[in-house]
Image: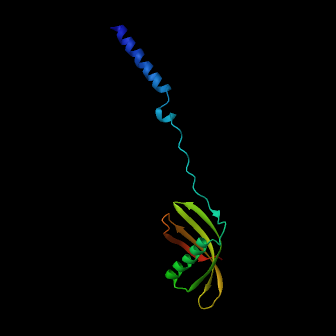
Amino acid sequence: MRALISMLIVAAAAVVGLCSVAPAASAREEPPVPQIVGGWKPIKNVNDPHIQELGRWAVSEHVKQASDGLVFSKVVSGEEQIVAGTNYKLVIQATRGGSGKSATYGAVVYEKLDKTRQLLSFNPAN
């Protein structure tokens, strides 16, 4: 009987020892690949019709909210960021409806994958 108890103790100790030395199954898995968040990149061609349309749309949306009579002239520069869709930081030249005075504005537009848009901000660029 003593021999049986001794063998059970030795076997239990061996199992505990093996469990503490062997790496867990989850430790042997590949580490997750880190997600890289998209950075802002300059828009290569601001004269692209789509970029100019985004600028025109941003001014139109701003006018709906502010009723200040701005009239779109052109997008002069910008950056884009690929996310679940695309964010655009646009520098837009526009004129005041009555005075004809030109000014520069900064707009941030989010365009979803389904091409719907949201104006996130619109401010004087000064």
Q: Nearer the viewer, residue 47 or 36?
A: 47
36, 75: nearer the viewer? 75
Q: Is residue 125 above or below residue 96?
A: above
Q: Residue at x 59, y 91 (%)?
A: 98
Rendered location of residue 28, percent (x, y): 51, 33
What residue occupies the far bottom of the structure in this picture? 98
Quarter the N terminus occupies: top left
The way the protein has been coloured in the rendering is rainbow
Which image quarter holds the C terminus? bottom right
Tell me the residue at 49%/27% (across/down): 22
Residue 50 position within the rendered picture, expressed as x and y whole percent measured from the top left: 58, 71
Front-lying residue, 83 or 28: 83
Question: Which corner quadrant of the image does residue 39 belong to?
Answer: bottom right
What residue is drawn where x is 52% and y is 67%? Answer: 111
Query: Relative to 125, is 6 above or below?
Result: above
Answer with the quarter of the image where residue 83 lies: bottom right
The residue lying furthest to the left in this view is: 1
Q: Viewed as shown, does residue 20 lie left or right of 89?
A: left
Q: Is residue 81 above or below residue 59?
A: above
Total numbered labels placed on residues in the image: 0
With 17 as the anchor, is 92 left or right in this view? right
The image shows residue 96 at horizontal and vertical percentages of: 60, 87
Task: Tell me the residue at 58%/84% (across/down).
Answer: 70
